[in-house]
Structures are given as structure tokens and as C-alpha cells.
Image (tube, grey):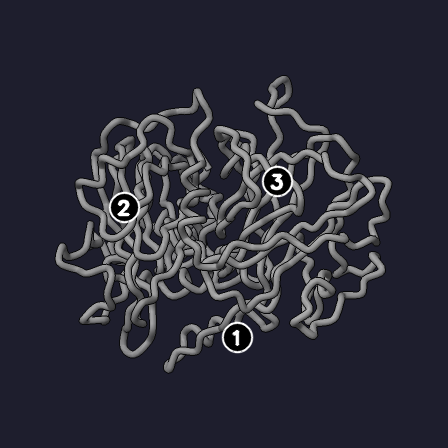
Amino acid sequence: MFGTPWADGTASISQCAINPGETFIYRFKVPKAGTYFYHGHYGMQRSAGLYGSLIVDVAKGEKEPFQYDGEFNLLLSDWWHKASEEQEVALSSKPFRWIGEPQTLLINGRGQYNCSLAAKFNKSSDVPTCQFSGNEQCAPQTLHVQPNKTYRLRLASTTALASLNFAIGNHKIKVVEADGNYVQPFVVDEMDIYSGESYSILFKTDQDPSQNYWISLSVRGRLPKTPEARTILNYSPSSPSNLPNSPPPVAPIWNDYNHSKTFSNKILSQIGSPKPPPSFDRRIILLNTQNHIDGYIKWSINNVSLLLPTTPYLGSIKFGLKGAFDHKKPPQTYPIDYNVMMPAPNTNATYGNGIYMLDFNSTVDVILQNANALAVNVSEIHPWHLHGHDFWVLAYGDGKFTKEDEKKFNLKNPPLRNTAVIFPYGWTALRFVANNPGVWAFHCHIEPHLHMGMGVVFAEGVHLIGKVPNDAFSCGLTGKILNHKG
């Protein structure tokens, strides 16, 4: 979104929400090829299914750093069998009503519910085998392949809650791209993918062509109450209606975080990729906690739960409005004596909508610090996504981050990403350059967590932004200014 920060799509941050019956056209330049996706950023519309893939091919005359014979694209998501508005009400209720786990995992919008494609391999369950002719709208989308070829598979996770594990039965997968950036290729049997992330993987069709093979999707980081999603890798000339003869891939234990950390630490930038600046100008430490505010359960960052204003920040700053949001600086860190391994002795937090004003072109370090939630011995996975930038993932660590942990920073070949996970009771160190004029959301990509306040906002170089389309600022105080001018 370089040069067009109003096209970022974040309601109350970069633009006004698009009201029913209105039209808003997003125009922006695409700076690089890669695997991406788009989604609604108002309320819990992503949970309701407002999302889709966005694939950017290399420019004419350019080549990818790897070769393949064919390409597939899989968008991974989860689905509650209830309206998103009902979920929003439950999460905002007193007493709190948790929405539970999603009923279904989806692969390109298709999944299984109350049946299993692989039922015959689970003797301990009475779940029946799914019956599909292949023509139904909900039937699994089969991937048809030729033997002895190399295929590129683009993966993106737009899940509202679930962290996922992806595997292709009997096939190795080679990871070559992450969040639109090439990485040093590495081979695994299966891989984790968190909400907000995207990847490209390569696989070879070097197995018995008379058989078909499972493609499996399972839940990570939460006790799996959602059945696995599956589809079929169909080798020609085998019939696509033939289910595989072998059992599906066995998913890693849901709370085997060492397994997940091993995968995350394999991801390194491609040789020749930009390296991070050797030092930072500013460090912001963000403590992730679950709190109470007036009897409501919320998620907070440094004890502040984000409550977005009615006037978009981008317009408020550009027009120099003083009363549109709280101009008090949000906390840079949290109390040094806070014990991240235990529930907080005081669980009360406050609402806030202050933003972090960053010096333009400065180098910013963000330390994401995870902690115990309200319940004892509970700390959750949080995938954090930054709008308007890529960042370098310098390191992951366990426990409370200290200055000594800087020795663990990878400044040689850290991956460039736009989404990074913090593991339970751990920390993740990020570095980015504030070189994109605009106002940018940085938030947990789990939809209920963001809805409950788990995010912050960065602003940089707004004075450098030229004319903004009027319909981006047609609400709140900016809308009144534009109406008065009109």
C-alpha cells in the first residue's frame, strides 16, 4: 500500500466502513509477486466468510527462483454454523459467552461435517463415511496431477480462530515462499500455518500413480474439537472417486509446541534478500494479556484494550483533529516485576485508542510478549499481523524477554514476514523500518481476540500523504469537515 494508505481496508484506521449500498474502489500498486489474500476488516466479517485469494504473478520477463509444472491454490479457513453477529454479541456479553471451537475446517470453502472421508480408518468412531458424487457444491475440491511432475501449491490461512497443520500423505513438501517473500528452500513432512500467513510449497508426484493420496488439515494449539478437513490428491490415470487405500497423515499432537517452534525456526530469508538494520531507534514491548473491564472479558496490550474511534485515524491526523482520539501516548512496555507465567494479581484493564507515533524512516523493534491468561496454566498462540510493512523475525524465545535475549537475534538471514506467531509463555522479536506513510494496524489475527481489543495502531509520515479520496473519510468528524467544504 505504498502511496495509497487509504486502500488498506481497515475500518476506523485507514478509512470509514463501507455502508450497505455504498461502493468503495480500492486502487493500489502491487510491489512484488507472491501469495496473498484479502478479507473484511470490520466486526467479524472474516468469520462470516468475507475473504478470498489474491495471487500476484511475477512481472513479464522475470522468473521465479524455482521451477514447477503446474500450480494449485488452497485457501484454508474455519466455519462456525452460526451468524457472525451472534458471535459478536456473545463475545461482548456480560457474563462472557465463549463462541466455542468452529464446527468445520474448510479447504477452498469446502469441508466435512458429521461425516469423514477417512471414516473406515477410524474404528473407534461411529462417524459415517461422507458420500459425494463429486458434483455437489460442497464436495471436496480434488487436486488432479500427472505422475513425475513438480507442482506449486499456494497456501493461505484466513481462519478466524484455528491454527492449522497441513500435510499431503506419502509426499514431502518443500517450502519456498512465506508471506510473499522467497525463503531458503527446506523440506518437511508437514507444516504449521497460522491465521494471516501464506506460503508456497513444492511437491513432486513421485508416488504410485495407481493410487490417490490424502490432503489433510488439522488443528494446532487448541484441543481439537473440530474434525480434520480432507481432500484428495488424484494421480492420473486413477479415478478421482477412488479414496486412498492408506490412512491419512497423522497430525502432530496439538500442544507439541517444540514441533511448531522447530518448523518456525527453519524459515530463513533467501540468499540476497534485504538484511535488517543492525540496530534499532525505538523498542516497543507489547504484553499480551486477558483482562476484565467493568465485568467484561477483554484482551489487552500493556493493559490497554483497543477500542477504535468513529473517525478514521488517517483522516484525524491528516486534518489535525484534536478530539477524534486519545493523543496520550500508549504504554511503551509493561511493569518489570510482572510475572508472565502466572495470572495477574490485578486483572483489571482499561479501554484506549491512543496510537504509537513513529518517526518516519526510523527502525523499530517490537517485542511481542505472551503471558498467562485469566485461567491458571493457560497461555494461547497469537499470530500477529502488521499492515503496510514486512518485518524481520529476529528470534523466538521462552519465558520473559530480557536484554540478554538480544544475543539470540538473527541479523544475518532472518525471514521477512507480515505475520508472526508468539507461542504460549514465549516472546517473538520483530524489526521493521517505518518507511510507509500512513496509519497501520498491528494486531492478533485471531478474529475473536481482535474483536475483544487485542491490537495496536502505528502512524508514520502522514504529513507526506497527498490527496485522499473523499469517500475514505465520509464518516465521523472528517465527514462533517468534508460536508462543510462541499
Nearest to the observer: residue 3 or residue 159: 159
Q: Name the spot of residue 111 as percent of width and height, x first.
A: 68, 61
> For the residue labelled by badge 1, is the local secondary structure a helix, a strand or a loop?
helix
> For the residue labelled by badge 2, is the local secondary structure a helix, a strand or a loop?
strand
Q: Dividing the picture into quarters, in which one does residue 418 lie?
A: top left
- Residue shown at 71%/69% (left/top)? 115
Q: Which mark is residue 86?
A: 1
Question: Which residue is denoted by mark 2 in the rendering?
Answer: 367
Q: Nearest to the eye among marks 1 and 2: give it.
A: 2
Q: Amino acid at mark 3?
A: Arg
Instruction: Report if the CB atoms under discs 1 and 2 are less than 8 Å apart.
Output: no
Q: Amino acid at mark 1?
A: Glu
Q: Determine whether, in the image, residue 225 is placed left or right of residue 266.
A: right
Q: Amino acid at mark 2?
A: Ile
- Residue shown at 41%/74% (left/top)? 92
Q: Name the spot of residue 89 as percent of width and height, x first.
A: 46, 75
Give the CA separation, mark 3 to mark 1: 32 Å
Question: Which residue is denoted by mark 3 in the rendering?
Answer: 154
